[in-house]
Amino acid sequence: MMARGGLSPQGIEGEWYIVDAEGKTLGRLASQVASVLRGKHKPTYSPHLDMGDYVIVVNAEKVRVTGDKLRQKMYYRHSGYPGGFRAVSLGDMLARKPEAVIENAVKGMLPHNRLGRKLRGKLKVYSGPDHPHAAQQPKTLEIEG
């Protein structure tokens, strides 16, 4: 069955892009990566379909933040049990799990529904310069900022 507007999710093949996060500002990087994941750079973009491409982000540990965010920005979670509230600063999160920082930032810029969860699977983040996706022959994606 064809989707509205004559577009069908079958036959849509996503390309692979690689982004080097070294020296890039976290928010600017995340918004442009989210746009590519969503497929907004394509003339065939449709908001209800997965038209996006795959994005590999390398050097996540070298992402840049402005101001005093390393100390002041906090990530919160709760286990659901009494006393299960946890808070971790951005600086600690970058030291422990730098991939999670970029994944969280991009997650907040994607739709919060089934489509967004599907798009998050197309994001691959690695803390160092190496990645296992060489077989996909990713193209370099230039990010401003």
Image: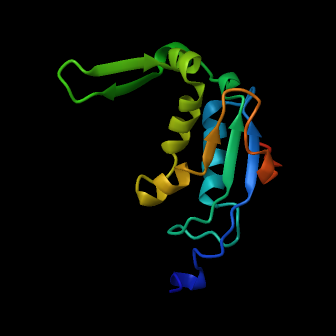
User: What colour scheme was applied to this rendering of the protein?
Assistant: rainbow
The residue positioned 37% from the left and 26% from the top of the image is 76
Residue 144 visible in this rendered orientation of the protein:
no
| Nearest to the observer: residue 145 or residue 107 | 107
| Nearest to the observer: residue 70 or residue 137 | 137
Rendered position, 75 above or below 17:
above
Horizontal and vertical percent position of residue 54: 67, 53
Q: In which quadrant of the rendered view does residue 78 lie?
A: top left
The residue positioned 70% from the left and 23% from the top of the image is 62
Q: Residue furthest left?
A: 82
| Nearest to the observer: residue 58 or residue 133 | 133
Quarter of the picture containing the C terminus is: top right
Rendered position, 100 above or below 71:
below
Residue 55 visible in this rendered orientation of the protein:
yes
- Position of residue 20 in the picture relative to residue 73 (left or right): right
The residue positioned 66% from the left and 23% from the top of the image is 61
Rendered position, 83 above or below 44:
above
Horizontal and vertical percent position of residue 32: 66, 46
Horizontal and vertical percent position of residue 136: 77, 53
Horizontal and vertical percent position of residue 143: 75, 42
Q: How many marks overall?
A: 0
